[in-house]
Amino acid sequence: MRRLFPHPLLSLLLFATWILLVNQVKIGSLVMALILAIVIPLLTAPYWPNRPPLRNVPGFAAYVLLVMWDIVLANIQVARIVLFMRNENIRSRWLAIPIDLKTPEAITILAGTITMTPGTVTSDMSSCGRVLLIHALHAPDPDSIINDIKTRYEARLKRIFE
């Protein structure tokens, strides 16, 4: 079974993503989803010899739900900023976020989470891999944004991956 599905979580994610993209559950879309779920991990397995150490699967599921909720809330906040705040009152800032994560997968998920959340985008990482540079659309209190990212996302990812 491990030979057919070298990365089972990736296969499951690819299968679900394809079904959500085509937005129909028919035999053709199920077969295509299964083909993608088998072929892509098999083709990429040689380039990904060490699977990420996912130590807390329920914690990861809770993290995904938290991020989805935060995306909804951030969309509302960004809409409020864009529609009702005057340009001179918007305080866009660049923020350097020191990170304690060590695994590349956890760092990538943190950077992706920041980028997926409307109003913030990860734009760079330091050469040492310990600082993320992000841009915030409206950051009147930069320290609170840094603290939110570290406590809300980074701490959870640390428990999941490390």
Image: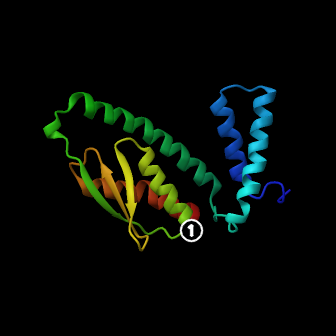
Q: How many marks?
A: 1
Q: Residue furthest right?
A: 1
For the residue pair 43 and 4, the one nearer the viewer reads as 43
Q: Left or right: 105 with respect to 7?
A: left
Is 35 situated above or below 85? below
Residue 48 image point, x, y percent: 67, 64
Q: How is the image coloured?
A: rainbow
Picture quarter with the N terminus: bottom right
Please give the name of the residue rendered at 45% of the width and 45% of the height, measured from the top-left corner: 116
Secondary structure, mark 1, is: loop
Quarter of image, res 87: top left
> As shown in the figure, which amino acid type bears the numbered disc 1?
Glu
For the residue pair 49 and 2, the one nearer the viewer reads as 49
Picture quarter with the C terminus: bottom right
Q: Residue furthest bottom?
A: 128
Is 149 situated above or below 77? below
For the residue pair 65 and 104, the one nearer the viewer reads as 104
Residue 80 image point, x, y percent: 28, 31
Residue 23 image point, x, y percent: 65, 27
Please give the name of the residue rendered at 40% of the width and 58% of the height, measured from the top-left corner: 151
Dot 1, how many residues are within 10 Å of its Cα: few (below 14), some (14-19), or many (20+)? some
Residue 70 image point, x, y percent: 43, 42
Q: Left or right: 149 with respect to 38?
A: left
Q: Residue furthest left?
A: 88
Quarter of image, res 137: top left
Q: Left or right: 3 with respect to 45?
A: right
For the residue pair 117 and 124, the one nearer the viewer reads as 124
Is 28 situated above or below 133? above
Q: Left or right: 135 with respect to 111?
A: left
Please give the name of the residue rendered at 46% of the width and 61% of the height, measured from the top-left corner: 155
Give the residue number, with chain letter if any, for mark 1. 162
